[in-house]
Image (cartoon, rainbow, N blue to C red):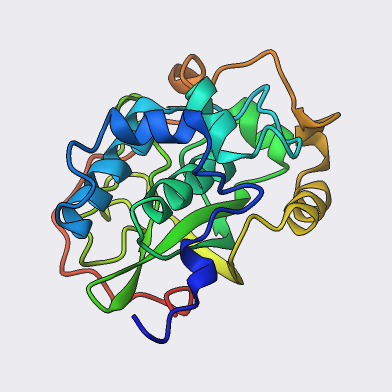
Amino acid sequence: MTDIPRTLTAPTEFLDYESEAVQTFIDDVVEDRSADRRANAVKLYYAVRDTVHYEVYGADLSREGLKASTTATTRSGFCLHKSALFAAAVRALGIPSRLVYGDVRNHLASPRLIEHIGGDVFFHGLTQIHLDGRWVKATPVFNKLLCRLYGMQALEFDGTADSLYHPHGSGGAMEFLKDHGSFDDLPYEFVMASMRSAHPRFLEGEGTVSGGSLSSEASAADPLPTPMPTPAPAPTPALNR
């Protein structure tokens, strides 16, 4: 790990893992912080994926609202919040992490959300962590229950391969359209400028529009196709660099 900057394991404004909230979140998941790093990273991935409720409506996009400590406390948020919490949690265990942003075509969306977003192309956040001498991408975003409601299979992660795409044929495969790069901390001004540019109708003050629930809107979403057997997945595209 000699070529990995120490800054990638340090706390930051948004990856504030020294906070009591993030430390408590980690302690609830990891029994032994000195144990195998990959095993602990996987535990934290599933904790963020499934114990932090995925919700796009009424989400706090203020500087305070996007801190890992806030998400660890509220246990709610969407990709921007959940990716930051995971990045912070693994850094607390000495695992280098970065935040990655891109534009994706997303199939887990209700008609109401698509209307607010302005289509099915979303500004998206995920996490990149350094394990066993290599960088792998992880997306602890859509929780298992929400995926079930939308007829999708949840994204798994074993710490050895990228976790980017829902299984092909599950009705929820994402298509990555543009890579905005990786960042040592949440680039607040860039994130907010991107959200305002891409999804102006989705924002309301320092947050997102309220008055909805993605879970309750699942029944209004278009029926998804029945999963079909598929060949081995294609190589990861340019986003995986």
- Residue at (31%, 38%) from the top-left corner? 152
Q: Quadrant of residue 16?
A: top right
Q: Name the residue at the right extreme.
A: 205
- Residue at (57%, 52%) from the top-left corner? 124
- Residue at (63%, 47%) from the top-left corner? 14
Q: Quadrant of residue 181?
A: bottom right
Q: Name the residue at the bottom extreme.
A: 3
Where residue 47 sits: x, y (%)? 31, 34
The answer to whether residue 240 is seen in the rendering is yes
The answer to whether residue 110 is seen in the rendering is no
190 shown above or below 14: below
Where residue 206 sits: x, y (%)? 81, 31
212 shown above or below 208: above
Where residue 182 sits: x, y (%)? 57, 69
Where residue 230 sits: x, y (%)? 17, 61
Q: Horizontally, is 122 left or right of 52 in the view?
A: right
Q: Horizontally, is 109 left or right of 122 in the view?
A: left
Pick the quarter of the image with the C terminus: bottom left
- Residue at (69%, 29%) from the top-left corner? 60
